[in-house]
């Protein structure tokens, strides 16, 4: 049974507390973010990622949109998502125009989510370049692996770490208030996933929650397992888990193992929290959601509204990462104006808006009350489907 009054209270509290901007002040926050040259030359930018996870490209482009808004980059029409992030970077470096920034064509690095390749090849090669060639002025570090590889004393180049589930638990930064490294800045929302889980529990009132994740330090961090376990103890519900690998295997295998897990737990739970996982792709959501819908299991996406559009019942609306991209762009502008990354506020809270799929609600017999409808910023009336052959 949905506890509407409790839900409404949580939503009102979230509106009062959440801000689409930094909530703590740092010494570096006073710096301007306006476009400036690097002693008469363009700033040379590099891109470093753990692998081709779709959010990395989306958040990077949201950041570029923020830079366009600030005048660092000329307006440009972005292509649709490109699965090959290296090919995307090549296109971007050749087509983007800026009087202040250069996106260096040969400064793209990825490990394709292969940990051995990461440790033996990608990381040492990139760090050697930074130390010996000294031809990079700024780094976009996308994802947990990237942040871990660059948050150390082998790197001293200003670095923004983006798209990490929990940079503190991943030991990328020391705390929400202090990255611990002069050259590192990582956006963080310390209780983001706890808020999501409390909101979902208020909406559905489940007793058994299904969660799929890789049982590794990175996998537990991506899935915010510590946060989920904390709320489970607080609210008295049980977590029913299924382990699905995503490291050192092909993406197709990660998708298959992930879908198998959701099929396995669908009949054992009365709600599911879809965690961040390499096997949860838009093309694979139809396979993931089929057993959940058949068993009339409400679902909540950890990632956001894109997955709601493709069949998950609900999530927090992300407005295509617009707001966090603008935050990253402002931070980057301040860094290039002289602020140390460590001295710029890291805490950022997204505007509290709900994304809801009415078609999924109908299929599982979930009747959202007026309070939820009023709090929904994105409402989908159909379930979008991505074919395997499409870029996703």
Image (cartoon, rainbow, N blue to C red):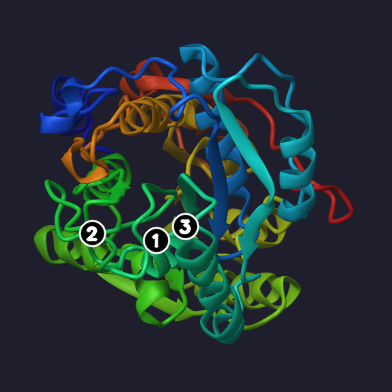
Foreground residue, 183 or 75? 183
Residue 100 image point, x, y percent: 54, 23
Labelled disc at residue 143: 3
Q: Quadrant of the N terminus?
A: top left
- In the image, taking residue 385 as reference, residue 130 lies left or right, namely left
Residue under label 2, please give it: 173
| Image label count | 3
In this rendering, is residue 275 above or below 367? below
- In the image, taking residue 195 as reference, residue 336 lies left or right, namely right
Foreground residue, 115 or 104? 104
Give the alpha-carbon distance from disc 1 to disc 2, as whole Å.
9 Å
In this rendering, is residue 129 above or below 185? below
Image quadrant in which you'd find residue 115? bottom right
For the view shown, which residue lies furthest in the front direction? Answer: 40
- Badge 1 crowding class, 10 Å Cα cut-off, few under 14, some 14 to 19, many 20 or more, is many
Residue 103 image point, x, y percent: 63, 39
Element marked by disc 2: loop
Foreground residue, 184 or 193? 184
Image point 49% across, 56% down: which residue? 134
Residue 227 image point, x, y percent: 22, 61
Q: Is residue 43 visible?
A: yes
Q: Is residue 26 visible?
A: no
Element marked by disc 3: loop
Q: Are marks 3 and 1 in contact (CB under 8 Å)?
A: yes
3 or 1: mark nearer the eye: 1
Q: Are marks 1 and 2 in contact (CB under 8 Å)?
A: yes
Foreground residue, 209 or 192? 192
Image point 23% across, 59% down: which residue? 173
Image point 30% across, 71% down: which residue? 239
Labelled disc at residue 147: 1
């Amino acid at each position: 049974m949905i506890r509407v009054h409790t839900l409404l209270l949580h939503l009102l509290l979230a509106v009062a507390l959440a801000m689409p901007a930094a909530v703590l002040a740092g010494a570096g926050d006073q710096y301007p973010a306006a476009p400036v040259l690097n002693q008469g030359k363009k700033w040379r930018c590099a891109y470093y990622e753990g692998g081709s996870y779709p959010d990395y490209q989306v958040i990077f482009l949201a950041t570029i949109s923020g830079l366009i808004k600030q005048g660092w980059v000329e307006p440009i029409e972005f292509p649709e998502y490109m699965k090959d992030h290296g090919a995307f970077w090549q296109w971007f470096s050749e087509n983007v125009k800026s009087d202040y920034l250069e996106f260096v064509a040969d400064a793209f690095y990825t490990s394709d989510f292969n940990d051995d390749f990461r440790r033996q090849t990608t990381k040492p090669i990139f760090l050697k370049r930074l130390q010996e060639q000294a031809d990079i002025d700024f780094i976009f570090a996308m994802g947990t692996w990237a942040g871990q590889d660059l948050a150390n004393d082998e790197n001293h180049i200003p670095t923004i770490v983006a798209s990490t589930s929990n940079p503190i638990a991943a030991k990328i930064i020391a705390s929400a208030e202090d990255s611990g490294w002069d050259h590192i800045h990582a956006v963080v929302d310390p209780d983001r996933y706890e808020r999501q889980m409390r909101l979902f529990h208020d909406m559905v009132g489940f007793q058994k929650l299904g969660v799929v994740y890789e049982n590794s330090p990175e996998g537990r961090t991506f899935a915010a397992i510590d946060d989920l376990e904390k709320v489970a103890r607080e609210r008295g519900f049980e977590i029913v888990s299924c382990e699905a690998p995503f490291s050192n295997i092909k993406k197709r295998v990660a998708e298959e193992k992930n879908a198998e897990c959701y099929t396995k737990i669908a009949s054992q739970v009365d709600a599911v929290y879809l965690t961040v996982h390499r096997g949860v792709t838009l093309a694979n959501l139809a396979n993931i959601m089929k057993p959940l819908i058949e068993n009339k299991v409400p679902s909540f996406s950890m990632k956001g509204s894109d997955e709601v559009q493709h069949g998950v019942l609900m999530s927090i609306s992300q407005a295509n990462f617009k707001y966090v991209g603008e935050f990253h762009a402002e931070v980057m502008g301040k860094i290039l104006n002289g602020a140390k990354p460590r001295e710029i506020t890291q805490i950022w809270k997204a505007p509290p808006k709900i994304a809801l799929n009415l078609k999924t609600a109908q299929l599982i017999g979930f009747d959202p009350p007026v309070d939820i409808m009023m709090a929904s910023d994105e409402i989908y009336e159909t379930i979008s489907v991505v074919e395997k052959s499409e870029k996703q």
